[in-house]
Amino acid sequence: MSEAITIVGGGIGGLTAAIALARRGFAPTVIERASRIAEVGAGVQVSPNGFAVLRALGHGDALGAVSVPSEAVALIDGPSGRPIARMDLAGRDYHMVHRAALIDLLAGAAREAGVAFRLGERVTGAEDGVECRLSFGDRMESHPFVVGADGLNSVLRGALNGTDAPFFTGQVAWRAIVPAMAPPRAQVFLGPGRHLVAYPLGRGRLNLVAVEERSDWAEEGWHIPGDPDALRRAFAGFGGPVPDWLARVEICHLWGLFRHPVAPRWHGRSMALLGDAAHPTLPFLAQGANLALEDAWCLAGALAAPDRAAALAGYQKQRAPRVTRAIAAANANARNYHLRGPARLAAHAALRVAGRVPGLLLGRFDWLYGHDVTAGA
């Protein structure tokens, strides 16, 4: 009889883990508090390291069918709209996709693989032991092994690590999708104390993520309604196509950006963490989904190992340095995107020079994008 594995969270990481575990002969069940597996209103960039996992699971072509292949990342001076540098991605597996389309793809693949779903159920507590005990309000259940893919406010993370104290970074982010045609590339508009990222999602849709430094606190979370006029005021000094895009924003969401430490413990006797539950990541390197895809593949392999305890320890030992480095690189982008004064002028000049050397800028991230956790599988 196949071993049962319970996964808390039906997002990108949880669904990918469910597929990978089903392929290895497990009987996964996904518990999701929403009444249906769905996602709305956001884009996601899948870089080659994340795409390698989807390809190994047999879903690379399916992603290609619902995404826009990215030809480049263009760095642009926000106020003037003039180009600074460009990183060519042609021939590499970079994809820009609506998060809902990726979730639909993964949910369908999970169902085809025999994954069971329990929807509309909220896990309120967890206890590690010989079996993991999950609380659903007043009801308790025992599960042989549970994967915590339950995001920023992970119940399982708390069970393994206690509470931690995230701190406000002094930055807030808006996200919106507008009707607009744009070239197949990610465009990053850099300005003093703020930046805006735009990339197409296909079907005449453009994803916008705009980050502004701000002293006042904003609530953490993805679905807080924002004020389109406040977004337009915050980026009123930007040029190029940005004013036209912002004029088209009718609905946007706002969230405060908080830093969380990487979890000290990623696993116990009967539970393990992946993705944001283990290592929340700021959106300055577009790696949150990709690191979750990597985690899902590696954790499935660890759970299938003959010596599970040793393999789980290896999972954390293998993954923690990599995600820590990626988080540090994202934090560095948060600083570099928002430079002011002479430092900004010098940095942009250096980028222009580096951009004239083919492959130089992108090569700085070979350690990230060129890594394939499925190699040798």
Image (spheres, rainbow, N blue to C red):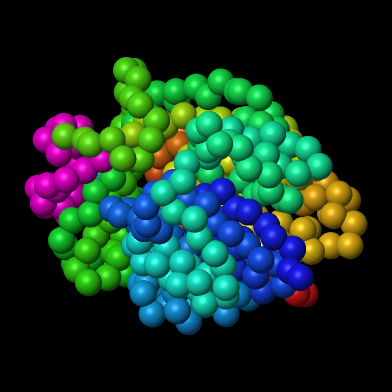
| Quadrant in the picture for residue 40 | bottom left
In the displayed structure image, the side of residue 264 where residue 156 appears, left or right? left
Farthest residue, direction top: 216
Taking the magenta stretch, the answer to whether it contains residue 238 is yes
Q: Which residues are magenta?
A: 228-254
In the displayed structure image, the side of residue 263 where residue 155 appears, left or right? left
Farthest residue, direction front: 139
* Residue drawn at (57%, 73%) of the image: 114
Q: Nearer the viewer, residue 137 or 66?
A: 137
Question: Residue 60 location, x and y as percent?
Answer: 51, 77
Question: Residue 45 location, x and y as percent?
Answer: 43, 60
* Residue drawn at (78%, 38%) of the image: 129
Res 174 visible: no
Q: How many marks?
A: 0
Taking the magenta stretch, the answer to whether it contains residue 253 is yes
Q: Quadrant of the C terminus?
A: bottom right
In the rendered view, tell whether residue 377 sits above or below residue 139. Answer: below
Q: Nearer the viewer, residue 155 or 355?
A: 155
